[in-house]
Amino acid sequence: MKKLYLFCCLLLTITSFSQEDAWVYFTAKNNSQFFYDSPLEMLSQRALDRRSNQNISLDLKDIPIDPSYISQIKLASGITVMAKSKWLNAIHIRGTQTAINSLTYFAFVSKVDFADKSLNETGKVAKAFKIKEQNKLKQTKVNFSYGTSENQIKMLSGQVLHQQDYTGSGKIIAVLDSGFPGVDTAQPFQRLQDNKQILGGYDFVSRSAEFYTGDTHGTLVLSTMGGFKENALVGTAPDASYYLFITEDVSSENPVEESFWVEAAEKADSLGVDIINTSLGYFEYDNPNYSHTYADMNGITNYISRGADIAFSRGMIVVVSAGNEGGSSEPHIGSPADAVSVLTIGAVNSSETKALFSSIGPSFDNRIKPDVMAQGVSAVLSDESGIIGTANGTSFSSPIMAGMVACLWQAFPNKANKEIRQLIVQSADRFTTPNAQYGYGIPDFSLAVNKGLFVEDFSKDYFVAYPNPTTNLVSVSFPESFNKGRIVFYNLLGKKVLERTINGISDTFSLKSVSNGLYFYKIEAGSFSKSGKIIKQ
């Protein structure tokens, strides 16, 4: 989401940027044993259950930052603490360059990373861009009367899941956005309120418990998932529950918003949230020295992207807008859309053609992005007054998809997040031939359900090497009961050029060592084998 601000920045003096933003990373966590012994001090029972269901152990990232570290930093002259992250064992601070550099004298400080990378002796730090917000127009067992929202649901075969009573019930979605005015009063959200499906929220920007405020973008986003007005608008997950978190400051573009986002994601984790939707993205900042470059979109450089991947490692699924820069001079995805594990969503129109504005991939390290697509042109939604209209943007294709993720996960509550993510990607219409515009394509959630039900069948659909063609990385997917096997690549003369052991539900490895061209592969697992062809470009 891009701020709509006047170009008054031209009037700013150079002193406006005398205050620098930076992240301070700490060396250790000295209080870990207490929290390992008393996990309910840091995570809710629902969060612990989510971990247990997915065999995810507690680790040092779950342990809160030592509060004495933060207290000492706060006492340092000229330093303001803006946000904190236990996952990254870091805090976001603001102060002069001299004051920030002086913090390295604390024995418990591991390193300082300035948002202005030129101020760092080594390494890189996060910068950002925002997906442009598109202007808005001024209960069941289910056969819902979808009204004008029918196409955006049926494009994904969402009605098939709804007809089977998979409407998101039992799943919790955290919406990280810019504000939610009208959600407590407008009619399309009344069903959520009556059924107590809004579980709470928080404004991380203003540090306020009031979250039915701020910019209307979050309201529009929520309506595509949880809105309900018969014969007009039905969200993709009308029976899911929601937390509403404000992390986006619409008054300025600053990397502290990445830190707010990570802090909110940690809160979502602690509350037992299943899915995070974020229709936000970061590439450019008001201070151009803070801005990211395409080279930063590698999944490991940007603060928010690292946080998003940690969220996935805690057992959540993170659904992210690809961005609305597809028609610009820098058409690539921003962050956290570049994160490895997030489900990055591009936009198509009602005829399933990519929207010109939808940002493209690949990530800088050449991974497939976006991952999948959903309707983001003339997406049907509600504004803060309850008026049903349409708007354009990957801001809306993302939550439309996030709602369907909740429905699918409801159908398979015992599956891990990585299994649900894989079912979605495998059901997409370009799964075997992905590209930088559509990713793996448009998912078919009815197909995803069928794959989930019959994933034990050792059919050709479940042993597949992709993408094909590829420029480097190859992934291989298997049935859930698969334990171990190998994949062997042969050139056109039948000579073995590469062999890899493969484990688990999916595995990824590099073809960097082989030349471009056509190769035959053979996957072997016990008495089962499957052959195929793959092109390296």
Image (tube, rainbow, N blue to C red):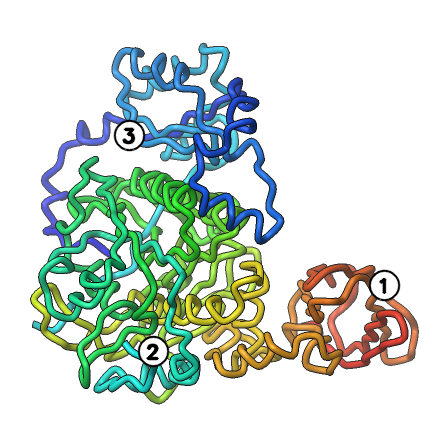
Residue at 45 percent of width and 11 percent of height: 106
Q: CA distance from mark 1 to mark 3?
A: 49 Å
List the residue tagged with mark 2: 375
Q: Which mark is residue 499?
A: 1
Residue type of the residue flagged with mark 2: Gln
Q: CA distance from mark 3 to mark 2?
A: 36 Å
Q: Position of residue 315 (x, y in %)?
A: 52, 51
N-terminal-most mark, 1 or 2:
2
- Categorize mark 3 by other alpha carbons within 10 Å: few (<14), some (14-19), many (20+): some
Q: Which mark is residue 279?
A: none
Q: Secondary structure at mark 3?
A: strand
Residue at 9 percent of width and 45 percent of height: 8
**Quarter of the image with the N terminus in it:** bottom left
List the residue tagged with mark 3: 82
Q: Position of residue 71 (x, y in %)?
A: 34, 15
Residue type of the residue flagged with mark 1: Glu
Residue at 38 percent of width and 28 percent of height: 91
